[in-house]
Image (cartoon, rainbow, N blue to C red):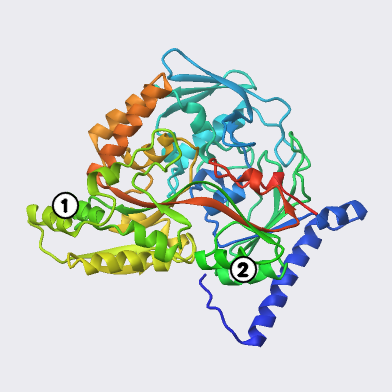
Amino acid sequence: MNLKWTSRRTAFAAALLAAVTVITVAASQSFAGGASHQKAAASVIVDGTTDSVVNIDPANQYDYGSFTLDLPLFQGLYGFPNGAKLQPVLATGCKASTSLKTWTCGLRKNVKFSDGSPMTSADVKWSFDRVNKIKGDQGIYTLLTNLKSVSVAGPYTVVFHLKGAQSTWPLILSTNAGYIVPKAKYPFNKIVPNTSPQIGTGPYELTKFTPGQQAVLKPNPNYWGAPAKNGGIIINYYSKSSTMKLALQRGEIDMVFRDFTPTELSSLRHKSGITVHEGNGVVIRYLVFNVSRPPFDKLAVRQAMAYLMPRQSIASRVYHGSVQPLYSMVPKGLPGHIDAYKTRYGATPNLAKAKAVLAAAGVTTPVAVDIWWTPSHYGDASADEYAEIQRALNASGLFKVTLKSAEWAQYSGTLGKTYDAFQLGWFPDYPDAEDYTEPFYKTGNFMTNGYTSSQATTLITKEHAARTTAARLAVLRQLQTLGAKDVSTIPYWQGKMIAVGRNNVHGIDGTLDAAFYMRFWQLSKS
């Protein structure tokens, strides 16, 4: 939904009244009751976002808007519940065989789902097998490519049998591909609709979801861990960040995660009673090529675009310096990062080299290309971002770019199936350089962009089997170099994790780290 903002007072008043009514009614319906319930309602935190939710069911969820809603509801055997350090969550720990192909995990006892039913190894096996059975169009199943089978050894032991050695398997267990759902409530071969009950082991349960409008979460009374520091969460979904900004300033919502335009963020930094919180910057934006579709089946065309990518102007003109140019799929700050694209294509656009690579390949210019982008999912600045890319490529005289767009619901299920080149962003499944290389360079990747490389496959296998961090990072550097050479993607900026809150919301800074988790359960409101 892409509603246009109107300045008419009557329309604004009606919209404002509706927004306040939705928040008030939702809170009263979800948390109404005696004095204790009224106190809980007062501590409910209302969040705003321009993200959208594709699927709540974790078996087909691979976008950040869905992930942010799922994180308080579901859990995996491992995770990052208190920071960017990997920890056991539903597992007590996992041990690998000598070959690194078998991982045996003990499960935490006395864990219940939000409906009160006990979690056992049968639910864990069901959850992993289900992801691989459904193979949803969002591509989350690709994280389990190395999984051969799952077996159980009693109610509290699960054994993962891998196709090849993988020293980083606990990191995979932390991803939403490994979120555990109850076998009795989630069908094996189909996704549970968003408006149906969702049942997990997390600190909250979902009491109401209205697509495109609102999600209401209350503390899970059956939660096995420490209770949430607030009385619940309401997430309001906005089609325009300008509307969301006004709601924050008026106190109709308590915080925003995510996304404001750079201009809006600059304005909010100077508003009384509001704080812009910033954390580690491991979010990236990149352009994807379908290397099996003309004209991007020609390496020279992709390389020429890499020579012309206007990283600096995007960072300065569009984002006002709030993001920084990126020259690798791995963001700066993560061990193993190298500036592979800067090494191969230079720090700034180079028209002469772009012309030379096209001429050497016999490519007639200007090359007509369609580039797709999505208007709201990555924030309202996406329009300016892709206008800047179009301007730079067309100004070179080597390309004639036509921009096309679609909202995320259509966009996310299409990608490389019909798009030749398209915008994507990446937030970590886990904060490791492996998660910024393997998902993009393995055969059958989630982008469905046709990229396949025997060399990449060999390097991925070698990285999985590496027994020391130094050896693993050395292979990951080789993967970045190969990725820059083959140019199936062009990374161009990395940004910070940003949330904006009113000053009576506490704990936001503590959840802004490289894991990129919004841990709502750690927030409180005074």
The answer to whether residue 451 is visible is: no
Tell me: residue 217, above or below residue 199: below
Q: Is residue 510 above or below residue 369?
A: above
Looking at the picture, tell me which residue is in the foreground, 302 or 357.
357
Question: Residue 139, percent across and down?
Answer: 42, 45
Residue at position x 57%, y 38% from top?
179
Q: Residue at x 63, y 31 (%)?
A: 89
Instruction: Check disc 2 and report its element: helix, strand or loop.
Output: helix
Give how far apart the Cα atoms at labels 2 and 1 are.
Answer: 43 Å
Amino acid on which disc 1 is placed:
Ala
Residue 54's place in the image compared with 264, above or below, is above
Mark 1 neighbour class, 10 Å CA radius: few under 14, some 14 to 19, many 20 or more: many
Q: Is residue 30 left or right of residue 284?
A: right
Would you say 217 lies left or right of 475 here?
Answer: right
Q: Secondary structure at mark 1?
A: helix
Tell me which corner region of the image, top left, top right, bottom left or bottom right, holds residue 355: bottom left
Q: Residue furthest right?
A: 35
- The answer to whether residue 89 shows anywhere in this view is yes
Query: Along the polypeptide, which appears first: circle 2 or circle 1?
Result: 2
Q: Which quadrant is home to the C terminus?
A: bottom right
Q: Residue drawn 65% across and 22% down? A: 155
Give the crowd class for mark 2: few <14, some 14-19, many >=20 residues within 10 Å. Answer: many
Say which residue label 1 marks: 300
Tag 2: amino acid: Lys
- Residue 52 sits in which quadrant? bottom right
Residue 245: image tag: 2
- x and y percentages locating residue 282 in the rendered image: 48, 45
Image quadrant where residue 410 sits: bottom left
